[in-house]
Amino acid sequence: MSHPLRFPKGLYGVTPEWDDTDRLLEAIRAAALGGMSALQWRRKTATAQDGLAQVRRVAALCRELDVACIVNDDWRLAALIDADGVHLGREDGGMAQARLALGPEKIIGASCYNEPALAALALDAGADYVAFGAVYPSSVKPQAVRATLEHIEQGRMLAESRPARPRPAVVAIGGITAENAAPVVHAGADSIALISGLFESEDIQATASRCAALFT
């Protein structure tokens, strides 16, 4: 019996480093039309002011499209714009702080790299999803540690074993494309996170459709 998830199943888009917000919004709309269920706003290079202006527009569009909007790294920013949640890496502060700021209804995801033990800790701390990667070589993070399909299987077993209902989800990230995603889904990923594989593809809507179809 499959349990409902706290984090939406399927395609999880992650924004590229684009300064052109109109272009980004158009791309997000295309991905949503193709079936993208969640979006993570991730900017490492924008100024705080430019970032805030962009993420406000992104969050508003996600609400319009009924796509879950997650902010990367910064739970204070997620709280400020009333995003649907936050994604925390190893250096991004404690989950308890984030939960206190965001409240029980918001989604908190955690990077677990290639460490199921880290996923177990995150799940114990109340994570709504645990993310493993990079599954394949990543152009965005070429130095990233590599997670195997076995790590995803182990993460899925950990998530299934938790009493929390709806259950936490397992996300895979890193070098994933519509062409290489199937084994990752078969290994137990509830969601696949794509940056370049989605937003740099020639037909964003078609790519999103192919990814979403892997979950039906």
Image (tube, rainbow, N blue to C red):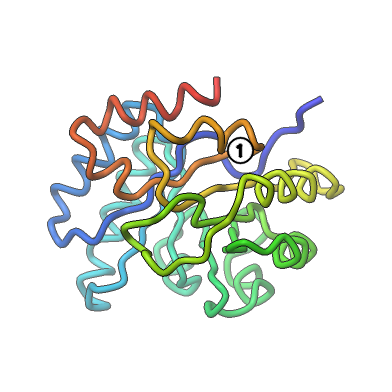
Task: Find residue 118 and report its image quarter.
Answer: bottom right
Amino acid type at image mark 1: Asp
Question: Horizontal and vertical percent for residue 167?
Answer: 74, 43
- Tell me the quarter of the image containing the C terminus: top right
**How many numbered tags mark residues here?**
1
Give the structural element (helix, strand or loop) at label 1.
Answer: loop
User: What residue is drawn where x is 76% and y is 67%?
Assistant: 121
User: What residue is drawn where x is 36% and y is 64%?
Assistant: 142
Is 24 placed above or below 188 here? below
Question: Horizontal and vertical percent for residue 191?
Answer: 54, 40
Question: Horizontal and vertical percent for residue 215?
Answer: 55, 25
User: What residue is drawn where x is 53% and y is 77%?
Assistant: 92
Is 71 placed above or below 4 here? below
Is 46 placed above or below 135 here? below
Question: Horizontal and vertical percent for residue 33?
Answer: 31, 27
- Tell me the quarter of the image containing the N terminus: top right
The residue nearer to you, when weighing 154 against 198, is 154
User: What residue is drawn where x is 30% and y is 52%?
Assistant: 58
The residue nearer to you, when weighing 180 against 101, is 180
The residue nearer to you, when weighing 147 against 66, is 147
- Within 10 Å of the Cα at label 1, are there few (<14), some (14-19), or many (20+) other Cα atoms? many
- Which residue, given by chain and number where applicable, does mark 1 sit on? 190
Is 36 placed above or below 63 here? above
